[in-house]
């Protein structure tokens, strides 16, 4: 696990929650829409049983939002960037070795397309990008 190679800035006494799991759960929370330390904590709290079971950890409760903030703000950005680049390189090499294709997706709502007066939902755009060949495509959806 690449996240396990990031240097933990905390003292040994302050390591109730393992850094790789805090980082992974923070990433999962952000990907699913969390945009604050409290949001990350809420994500962990809601999914705590499943996370404990899936990763074979025994957290009794999620870390406080202040603990999450302290952990994330104490990280060296260069270490985090290095790990993300290594992970991306591993994905690329595994794609070449197995012949599988990796696609990146991004969805956006078109600004100004929401019409509250007529109760019309915002128009959506979904873009897909083939990482290996650098080919992208977009699809428009009018809800």
Image (cartoon, helix red, strand yellow):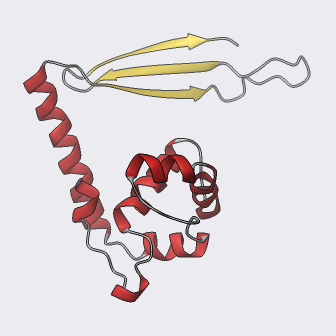
Residue 96 x %, y %: 10, 25
Residue drawn at (27%, 51%) of the image: 84
Front residue of this view, candidates 135 and 41 = 41
Residue drawn at (40%, 77%) of the image: 74
Which residue extends farthest left?
A: 97
Please identify the quarter of the rendering in which residue 8 is found.
bottom left
Please identify the quarter of the rendering in which residue 21 is found.
bottom left
Q: Please give the count of numbered marks on the rendered protein.
A: 0
Residue 79 x %, y %: 25, 66
Residue 27 against residue 23 in the figure, above or below: above
Quarter of the picture containing the C terminus is top right
Q: Is residue 72 left or right of 121 when viewed as pictured?
A: left
Residue 46 x %, y %: 63, 50
Front residue of this view, candidates 139 and 67 = 67
Residue drawn at (53%, 75%) of the image: 67
Residue drawn at (57%, 57%) of the image: 40
């Amino acid at each position: 696990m690449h996240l396990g190679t990031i240097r933990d800035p905390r003292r040994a006494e302050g390591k109730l929650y393992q850094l790789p799991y805090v980082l992974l759960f923070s990433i999962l929370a952000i990907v699913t829409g969390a945009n604050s330390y409290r949001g990350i904590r809420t994500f962990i709290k809601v999914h705590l049983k499943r996370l404990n079971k899936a990763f074979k950890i025994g957290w009794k409760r999620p870390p406080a939002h202040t603990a999450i903030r302290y952990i994330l703000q104490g990280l060296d950005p260069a270490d985090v960037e290095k790990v993300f680049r290594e992970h991306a390189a591993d994905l690329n090499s595994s794609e070449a070795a197995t012949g599988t294709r990796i696609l990146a997706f991004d969805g956006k709502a078109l600004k100004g397309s929401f019409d509250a007066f007529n109760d019309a939902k915002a128009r959506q755009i979904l873009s897909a990008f083939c990482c290996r060949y650098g080919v992208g495509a977009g699809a428009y959806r009018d809800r």
